[in-house]
Amino acid sequence: KGGCGAVCPSHNIPCVGCWGPTDDLNVTSEYNLLKEKGYDPDEIITKIRKFGGSGVVELVKDLEKKKGAKK
């Protein structure tokens, strides 16, 4: 979507047509759903970072802490 306001291109990350950031992220539910479907937690976190942008960095850090605590 042209002019979505995403920071990706300004940080030399190519646009993948994700339609830009959303105001109502639910990262914890997304993480848990993908984990239930059998995705590797490290892969989930990598994808969340890639497509979530800088706004989810703290959420991802929290997920990583929880993941580490469950090991």
Image: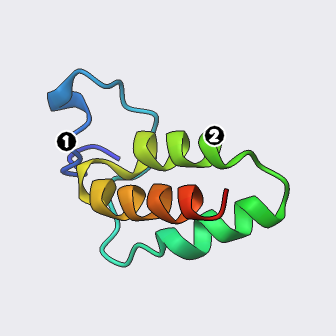
Q: 48 or 66: nearer the eye?
A: 66
Q: Position of residue 54 (x, y in %)?
A: 24, 49
Q: Which residue is mark 2?
A: 43
Q: Residue at x 52, y 66 (%)?
A: 66
Quadrant for residue 68, please give it: bottom right
Q: Which residue is mark 1?
A: 7
Quadrant for residue 55, please give it: bottom left
Colour convention: rainbow
Type of amino acid under label 2:
Glu
Residue 30 vertical placement versus 29 (above, below):
above
Counting residues from the start of the chain, the first of labels 2 and 1 encountered is: 1
Determine whether the residue tagged by mark 2 lies in a helix, strand or loop. Answer: helix
Quarter of the image that includes the C terminus? bottom right
Q: Position of residue 29 (x, y in %)?
A: 59, 76
Q: Residue at x 77, y 49 (%)?
A: 39
Query: Residue 32: which numbered mark, if any?
Result: none
Residue 70 vertical placement versus 54 (above, below):
below
Q: Position of residue 13 (x, y in %)?
A: 31, 25
Q: Residue at x 73, y 45 (%)?
A: 40
Q: CA distance from mark 2 to mark 1?
A: 22 Å
Q: Position of residue 3 (x, y in %)?
A: 20, 47
Residue 63 vertical placement versus 5 (above, below):
below
Quadrant for residue 49, please give it: top left
Determine whether the residue tagged by mark 1 lies in a helix, strand or loop. Answer: loop
Q: 47 or 22: nearer the eye?
A: 47
Q: Are marks 2 and 1 in contact (CB under 8 Å)?
A: no
Q: Residues within 10 Å of mark 2 (few under 14, many from 20)?
A: few
